[in-house]
C-alpha cells in the first residue's frame, strides 16, 4: 500500500516537480447569492427581507474577489466556494 504522507529529505524534495513540492492552493466555486457573506460582514447594500444584494451586478471589487482565503469560507459557512490543494 503506498504511503500518502511521507517525510522526505531536503535532497529528495529538491528533486520533486514543483506541483508536488508545493501543491497549489486554489479557491474554486461560484457565488450562490445566499447572502451569508453579506450578513456576516453586515453589508448595508444587502436586503435581508428579499435575501439579495441591491447592487449584485455592479458590486465593488472587494465583493467580486471574495473569498480570498479558506477561513472566510469557513466563517460564513459559504455553500458556493471551497479550497482545493494542500
Image (cartoon, rainbow, N blue to C red):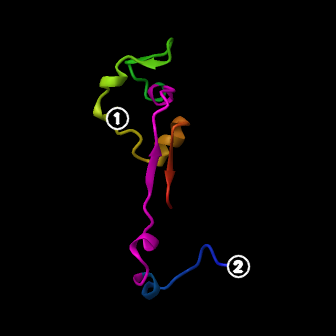
Q: Are marks 1 and 2 in contact (CB under 8 Å)?
A: no
**Membership of 60 in magenta stretch:** no
Vertically, is 3 above or below 69? below
Looking at the rendered structure, the secondary structure element under dot 2 is loop
The location of residue 54, given as percent across then percent down, is: 38, 16
Q: Quadrant of the N terminus?
A: bottom right
Judging from the image, what secondary structure is the residue with disc 1 in? helix
Q: Residue 71, how many percent across, how many down?
A: 49, 45
Would you name the residue on which mark 2 appears?
1
Using the image, determine if residue 44 lies above or below residue 78: above
* Residue at 46%, 38% in the rendered image: 30
Number of other residues with Cα within 10 Å of mark 1, as a class: few under 14, some 14 to 19, many 20 or more: few
Q: Earlier in the sequence, mark 1 or mark 2?
A: 2
Check the image and name the residue furthest to the top: 49
Q: Nearer the viewer, residue 65 or 41?
A: 65
At 46% across and 86% down in the image, what residue appears? Answer: 12
Q: State yes or no: residue 31 in magenta.
A: yes
Residue ID at (43%, 47%): 69
Task: Kindly report which numbered mark, 1 or 2, lies closer to the viewer in this rendering.
Answer: 2
Which residue position is annotated with label 1?
64
Which stretch did the figure color magenta? 14-38
User: In this image, 33 relative to 7: left or right?
Assistant: left
Residue 2 position by quadrant: bottom right
Could you tell me how many numbered marks the image carries? 2
Amino acid at each position: 500500500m503506498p504511503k500518502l504522507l511521507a517525510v522526505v529529505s531536503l535532497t529528495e524534495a529538491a528533486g520533486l516537480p514543483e506541483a508536488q513540492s508545493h501543491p497549489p492552493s486554489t479557491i474554486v466555486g461560484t457565488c450562490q447569492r445566499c447572502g451569508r457573506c453579506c450578513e456576516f460582514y453586515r453589508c448595508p447594500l444587502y436586503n435581508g427581507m428579499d435575501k439579495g444584494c441591491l447592487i449584485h451586478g455592479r458590486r465593488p471589487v472587494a465583493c467580486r474577489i471574495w473569498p480570498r482565503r479558506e477561513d472566510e469560507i469557513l466563517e460564513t459557512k459559504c455553500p458556493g466556494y471551497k479550497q482545493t490543494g494542500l
